[in-house]
Image (tube, rainbow, N blue to C red):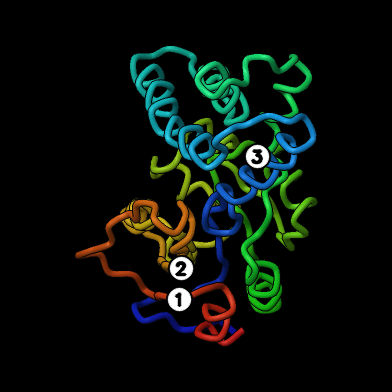
Amino acid sequence: MSLPTPESGAVRALVFDVFGTVVDWRGSIIREGEAQSAAKGWRVDWPAFADAWRAGYQPAMQRVMQAAASGEPAWTKLDALHRGILDTLLPRFGLDRLSEPERERLNLVWHRLDPWPDAVAGLTRLKARFPIATLSNGNVSLLVDMARHARLPWDCVLSAELFRKYKPDPAVYRGAADLLGVAPNELLMVAAHPSDLAAAKRAGLKTAYVDRPLERGPDGPREDSAGQRFDWVASDFVDLAAQLGA
């Protein structure tokens, strides 16, 4: 049975932003980095390293999109974007001593991110009632590895890679609806980032905001959601499942 939404239409499937919404990218990078430092006797400011690595994501993605807009064949997987940012950070954090295999393993930490404590239980409840899928700028192999590592129970993995465009391009959101066989207003986008939800809403999707106050650390910046309206607001995935009757 379809669940009526606060507006017209009925939710038939859910898609999820992943980094920060489903998994704790910052804490995962810090934990893995600190374990490596302890083994090798290094002194590295891993919280600052994680923040700097993530901060390079939007500028790198913008460069690719600008190149594509000018007609260049510029699509780049997120793994390659992450590696380019990483290579610029290594000297700054005293990690230029890393060998190439060590650099590659560190770059693939994004494939090994741990879920938020509520993620698996909440997704499992939601999956019992709705098809659930990723909708991330992460490439497919990254998302598959992450799902296996974190035991995330997706029905399928949808990536911006399938559309050769990044969110917030509307083609990504509408393309996900098409692949799942639902109308845009029958697809619910779940994210901890108001900007992602605003773009999904412009593309015709329903929206659910899940607060992740510790995504950027206890004192980190928060994305402003003032003035935005979401179809649902939840404290975590278990809360969202309860609100959706799952």
User: Does residue 113 appear in the picture of this structure?
Assistant: yes
Please tell me which of labels 1 and 3 falls first in the chain.
3
From the viewer's perspective, is the residue at label 1 or at label 3 nearer?
3
Q: Is residue 144 left or right of residue 240?
A: right
Which residue is painted at 65% across and 39% down in the image?
110
- Whichever of callouts 1 and 2 sits on the residue coming sooner in the sequence is 2
Is mark 1 in CB contact (under 8 Å) with mark 2? Answer: yes
Which mark lies nearer to you, 3 or 2? 3
Residue placed under numbered mark 3 in the picture: 110
Q: How many angstroms separate mark 1 from mark 2 (CA)?
A: 5 Å
Q: Earlier in the sequence, mark 3 or mark 2?
A: 3
**Residue 215's x, y, as percent?**
48, 55
Q: In the displayed structure, would residue 126 be above or below residue 33?
A: below
Q: Is residue 154 left or right of residue 71?
A: right
- Figure disc tally: 3
Q: Are there few (<14), some (14-19), or many (20+) residues within 10 Å of tag 3?
A: many
Residue at image coords 61%, 55%: 23
**Which sits in the foreground, 208 or 81?**
81
Residue type at mark 2? Val
Q: Which quadrant does the N terminus fall into? A: bottom right
Disc 1: which residue: 234
Q: Position of residue 201 (x, y in %)?
A: 34, 59
Residue 82's mark?
Answer: none
Three-letter code for the amino acid on which mark 3 is drawn? Trp
What's the CA distance linking mark 1 and mark 3? Answer: 26 Å
| Front residue of 234 and 45 | 45
Q: Residue at x 46, y 50 (%)?
A: 173
Residue in view at x 74 percent, y 63 percent:
153
Q: Using the image, tell me which numbered label, if any, was put on residue 210.
A: 2
**61 or 212: which is nearer to us?**
212
